[in-house]
Image (cartoon, rainbow, N blue to C red):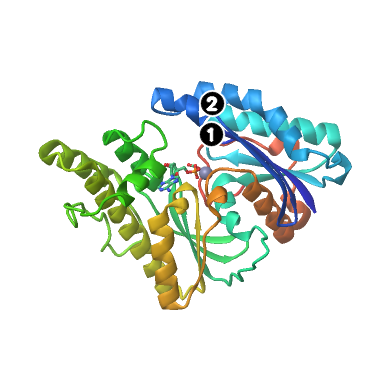
Amino acid sequence: MNILAIESSCDETAASVIHDTEILSSVVSSSASIHEKYGGVIPEIAARKQVEFIIPVIKEALGEIPVEQINSIAVTVGPGLMGSLLVGVEAAKALSLAWDKPIIPVNHLVGHIYANFVKYAEVIKLDFPAVVLVVSGGHTDLILMKDHFDFEYLGGTLDDAAGEAFDKVARLLGISRYLGGVRLSKKASECQDNILDGRLPRPLLNKNNFDFSFSGLKTAVKRIVEIEDPPVDSVACEFENAVCDVLIVKTIKAVKKYNAKSILLGGGVAANTQLRERFQTEAGNMNVVLSIPKINLCGDNAVYIGVAAYFKHKVFGTKAFVSLDNIKANPSLGIMDRV
Ligand code: KG4
Ligand code: ZN
């Protein structure tokens, strides 16, 4: 099955051609550098950039692949920014009409999970049940994956997402005005002596549930910076440690409770080096298989949208195809919402 996948949920315009779970092509164009000037994503500008990029990006992803060899079109229908989502969704509908190909709508958050099922030379066998941690700029969700497209919600953030907390703290520390996760993490890695060791809270760490909360942590950073003005690398290090502690402890608790055989990570924050390394150690200690997408598949792209669509079709057959009238962009789609 060859799928043309389209992703346009926020400030990345992406298209990819997937053969089953194998990548034939992947193109990502981002308007992030423009938003950096404003210190946050401007929805109107993001949508206009989507309009500008969508056709060239799809064309480049198709390359020499003849349209006749495309079996279906996968598209992100949410969550995300309405203006951005609409561009991808309407482009997919237009191509579906013109080429007479069915559409498979995909939930962006489910897509992040399927970055773990992209085929590479080295095969990691992922057994179910798996505990999945989706950590992105807008979401932090812990899911029990019993099989393909069989998910149970365990918990999620009650306020800010983990990536959002990274971004806000990076801005507060003057490290970056937009999407500061990578730069904050780099600053943390430069810290030789964390003089704030253990000083920041680990929110909800010992609560008997799988929920997260990061907004209080951000406020605690603000207070400590205002009162003590500590070295920026110590704050970055202590903040990163606090976020990783909570994400790891809660995930491992879920693994133990549900006797999970695998741990899957997904989303932009899964690119974080400390998180990746500490999960490797934890999974090794518990003899559980760990899968973390390659760095370039953690952030937004269309590869995982195509792979999610492939599995959706495998599980639901032609029921995975949705008529044009019933495909709608939904900015507030949750990870458990069916599309
Ligand atoms: O999944 P993603 O690309 O977009 C959404 O769907 O939200 O995630 C973006 C988020 C941003 O908050 C960004 O700062 C964060 O992922 N991020 C990181 C790292 N790389 C990206 N956070 C911490 N460490 C990183 N290395
Ligand atoms: Zn994302």
What residue would you read off at disc 2?
Answer: 46
Q: Which one is in front, 24 or 232? A: 232
Residue 300's disc is none
| Whole-percent x, y for residue 71 in the image | 82, 47
Q: Where 287 falls versus 75 (above or below)?
A: below
The answer to whether residue 42 is visible is no
Residue in the image at 49% along x and 24% along y: 34
Whether disc 1's CB lies below 8 Å from ligand 1 is answered yes
Residue at 34 percent of width and 57 percent of height? 244
Q: Quadrant of residue 16?
A: top right
Give x and y (percent) for residue 251. Answer: 40, 64
How many residues crowd around disc 2 within 10 Å: few (fewer than 14), some, or many (20 or more)?
many
Please state which amino acid type lies under the numbered disc 1.
Cys
Within-10-Å neighbours for mark 1: few <14, some 14–19, many 20+: many
Amino acid carrying mark 2 in the image: Ala
Residue at 36 percent of width and 58 percent of height? 247
Give percent across and percent down for residue 59. Answer: 76, 33
Residues marked 1 and 2 touching at CB (< 8 Å): yes
Residue 274 lies left or right of residue 63; in this view the side is: left
Return the residue found at the far right: 68
